[in-house]
Image (cartoon, rainbow, N blue to C red):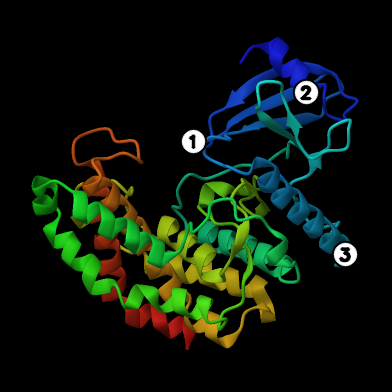
Amino acid sequence: METAQLISVFSKFDEASNFKSFQELASGHINDTYLIETVQQPKFVLQRINHGVFKDVPGLIENKVSVSIHIQEKFKALGKAGEKKEVLRFVRTKEGKSYYQSENGDYWNLMLFIEDSVTFETVHDPEIAYEGGKLFGEFLNLTDDFDASKLTEVIPKFHDMSFRFQQFDAALLNASSDRVKQAETLISKVKAFKEEMHILQNLKDNGAIKIRVTHNDTKISNALFTKENKGLCVIDTDTIMPGIVHYDFGDAIRTICNSAAEDEQNLELVTFNVAYYKAYLKGFLEKTGSALSAIELRYLPLGAKSMIFIMAIRFLTDFLNNDVYYKTKYENHNLVRAKNQFKLIASMEEQMNQIQEKHE
């Protein structure tokens, strides 16, 4: 991206600061993100949303702006202004819109940069898991009274288990005999888990579990921390949608509690870290307070198991489809990823007594 182009885009927003310089931020794999420095000192994050991936970008941006404003108002009402907490703050265009669309069709939004913050790609300390749990738990608590039906579903059926099984069945039907043979053990596991993996889906569809504002990408790198390692702000809210608490809780646990990278080939290194689970759960429950119902609390462990499984079935489906969705670095990369996630489920199941005791 040329400097002149960024200056032109930045000038469309209702901000009096003058553009000084920029640097591209490497975080994220979908959108283009730039740190903008200005003459008057404030820094901004300018983001181009990938409208090839997200079909309704205006809806996506309205989602995160409206939720951000809601949290800001809750902070004020609860007297949190003095606490070391932040919320994403968006700058509108000079025309009053929450995004700018360039002549070539690109969508842009602008946020204030949050100073003196750090992120973690992985968790190596229970205290970080605990602080992460508090941060994502507070996000859920602060949005408990937000009408989720007003949100756009930016990725339809993202966590819909029936949809993921339909994709798997179609891939299996059309897969080469060689790939089916390589994956036959995992294919059997998918079929064995089918009934259990629809429990949360059925409860959601039957109205037994509340539809909430969910973040849908609660990996630890989407949490900002202070330099003292205290939770500061939830970021990367592009995937905010209506959902159930188990999506966010489960995805956080999936990424925080795996002792190895999700494509680690040595499955002996893949274990479920119960200590991190307990730390995250402790922080999460401290901040959710009375926002969760008894049935939501009861099924939190299944939420974690279900989110690990949904990634396992997606990796396996892509392998059967000849690797058309996820980028791969070597042959059978998606099969390795699927095996990794199934090993994580097995490790979790072996320790389920310890996990369940925290929910009784």
For marks 2 and 1, give the CA distance.
22 Å
Q: Nearer the viewer, residue 358 or 45?
A: 45
**Callout 2: helix, strand or loop?**
helix
Q: Earlier in the sequence, mark 2 or mark 1?
A: 2
- Residue type at mark 3? Gly
Q: Earlier in the sequence, mark 3 or mark 1?
A: 1
Percent x, y for residue 36?
72, 24
Badge 2 density bin: few <14, some 14–19, many ≥20, Cα 10 Å = many
Whether residue 142 sits left or right of residue 234 in the image: it is right
Q: Which residue is mark 1?
A: 29
Task: Give the answer, above or below, for where 172 lies relative to 207.
Answer: above
Q: Which residue is mark 2?
A: 10
For marks 3 and 1, give the CA distance.
36 Å
> Marks 2 and 3: which is nearer the front?
2
Q: Which residue is mark 3?
A: 79
Which residue does the image show at 53% across and 35% down from the upper left? 52
- Residue type at mark 1? His
For marks 2 and 3, give the CA distance.
33 Å
Question: Which quadrant of the figure contains the N terminus?
Answer: top right
> Marks 3 and 1: which is nearer the front?
1
Q: Are marks 2 and 3 in contact (CB under 8 Å)?
A: no
Badge 3 density bin: few <14, some 14–19, many ≥20, Cα 10 Å = few
